């Protein structure tokens, strides 16, 4: 999912727009029956998930999003409210570059709703700037590592998005370049800002308190949030927890592996000492140690023939660690 913003709304509907809208309406609509607004669906900047679209990907998405309906997420009353994109294009913002040095481009969409009793509140909210964010979903054919160019959707590489790598005398931020979009799904309104470093999950907790508890309490109790915002916050917290659990599971796995291979490679080393050495390490360092022990163990025990998943002899194949 990517997020964008609604930027202009309620402008007078010109005949050209009305004609484009007419393609989706069951009967010809008059200008006063239609409410239009303009959105930035996404851009080519690296986002907080350390991903970005290529410019050709945005061009393709511009074609894919035309005709797609938007839903009003998390709003039970909004089940039947929809807006539809009737025009979409890539806009190059002159004089601005992305953090990786490309011309900054946004995917600009024009959408319409039929003015009706049912939509009146929503139109008010958009006009008032309350419903400002949109979130879009799409499927991409390629997810390329910015460091080594490998397509991660097929074969994960060793680089970790969000980490800085040294290369060619410069520091490079590892991220994923999303390319060759295959499909665009529905888009929806959300109520939480999604700019890099501006998300709700960052910078909230006062010092010395448990950030998790504060956020949970906030999500449950409100503290100035609307019911929609509370739902959105709760949804994001769930996602963060899920990601954290995956991270812990990964560390546990490589920790166990490093410990086991360490015992094989260094049979004389007391296991407690080995555990004490490995305990404070993060998953990447543990992976390095596991690889080292694997090589060492392969040298020590060349005759081991059990072809278990991590049998020491596999080290010779030099297979990269996979998640
Ligand atoms: Zn890579």
Image (cartoon, rainbow, N blue to C red):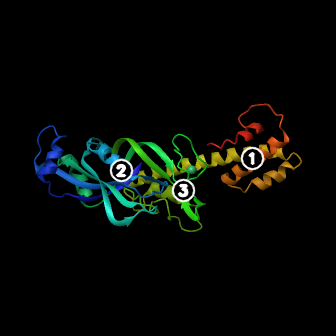
Question: Which is nearer the N-term, disc 1 or disc 2?
Answer: 2
Instruction: Say if disc 3 is inside 8 Å of ligand 1.
Output: yes
Left or right: residue 263 compared with residue 26: right
Q: Secondary structure at mark 2?
A: helix
Q: CA distance from mark 3 to mark 2?
A: 20 Å
Neighbor class of circle 2 (other Cα within 10 Å; few <14, some 14-19, many 20+) is many
**Mark 3–mark 2 CB contact (< 8 Å):** no
Residue on which the image places disc 2: 58
Q: Is residue 75 visible?
A: no
Question: Which is nearer the N-term, disc 3 or disc 1?
Answer: 3
Q: Is residue 96 above or below residue 111?
A: below
**Mark 1–mark 2 CB contact (< 8 Å):** no
Left or right: residue 82 compared with residue 175: left
Residue on which the image places disc 3: 174
Q: Secondary structure at mark 3?
A: loop
Residue on which the image places disc 1: 258
Please tell me whether mark 3 or mark 1 is closer to you in this view: 3
Q: CA distance from mark 3 to mark 1?
A: 26 Å
| Residue 47 horizontal/vertical position (percent) | 45, 57
Q: Secondary structure at mark 1?
A: helix
**Mark 3–mark 1 CB contact (< 8 Å):** no
Q: CA distance from mark 1 to mark 2?
A: 43 Å
Question: Which is nearer the N-term, disc 3 or disc 2?
Answer: 2
Depth check: 50 or 101 in front?
101
């Amino acid at each position: 999912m990517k997020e964008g913003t609604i930027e202009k709304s309620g402008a007078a509907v010109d005949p050209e727009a009305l004609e484009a809208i007419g393609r989706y309406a069951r009967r010809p609509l008059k200008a006063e029956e239609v409410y239009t607004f303009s959105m930035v669906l996404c851009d080519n900047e690296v986002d907080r998930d350390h991903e970005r679209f290529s410019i050709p990907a945005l061009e393709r998405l511009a074609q894919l999003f035309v005709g797609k309906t938007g839903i009003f997420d998390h709003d039970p009353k909004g089940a039947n409210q929809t807006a539809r994109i009737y025009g979409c294009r890539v806009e190059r913002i002159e004089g601005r570059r992305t953090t990786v040095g490309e011309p900054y481009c946004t995917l600009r969409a024009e959408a319409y709703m039929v003015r009706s009793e049912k939509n009146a509140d929503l139109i008010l909210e958009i006009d008032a700037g309350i419903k400002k964010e949109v979130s879009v979903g799409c499927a991409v054919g390629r997810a390329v590592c910015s460091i080594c160019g490998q397509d991660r959707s097929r074969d994960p590489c060793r680089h970790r998005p969000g980490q800085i790598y040294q290369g060619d005398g410069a520091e490079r931020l590892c991220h994923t370049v999303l390319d060759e979009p295959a499909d665009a799904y529905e888009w929806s309104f959300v109520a939480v800002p999604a700019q890099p470093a501006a998300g709700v999950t960052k910078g909230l907790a006062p010092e010395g308190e448990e950030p998790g508890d504060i956020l949970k309490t906030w999500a449950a109790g409100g503290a100035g949030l609307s019911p929609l915002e509370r739902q959105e916050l709760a949804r994001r917290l769930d996602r963060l927890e899920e990601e954290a659990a995956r991270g812990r599971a990964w560390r546990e796995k490589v920790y166990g592996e490093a410990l086991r291979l360490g015992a094989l490679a260094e049979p004389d080393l007391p296991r407690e000492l080995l555990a004490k050495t490995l305990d404070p390490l993060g998953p990447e360092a543990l992976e390095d140690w596991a690889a080292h022990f694997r090589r060492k163990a392969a040298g020590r025990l060349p005759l081991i023939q059990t072809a278990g998943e991590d049998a020491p002899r596999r080290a010779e194949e030099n297979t990269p660690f996979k998640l």
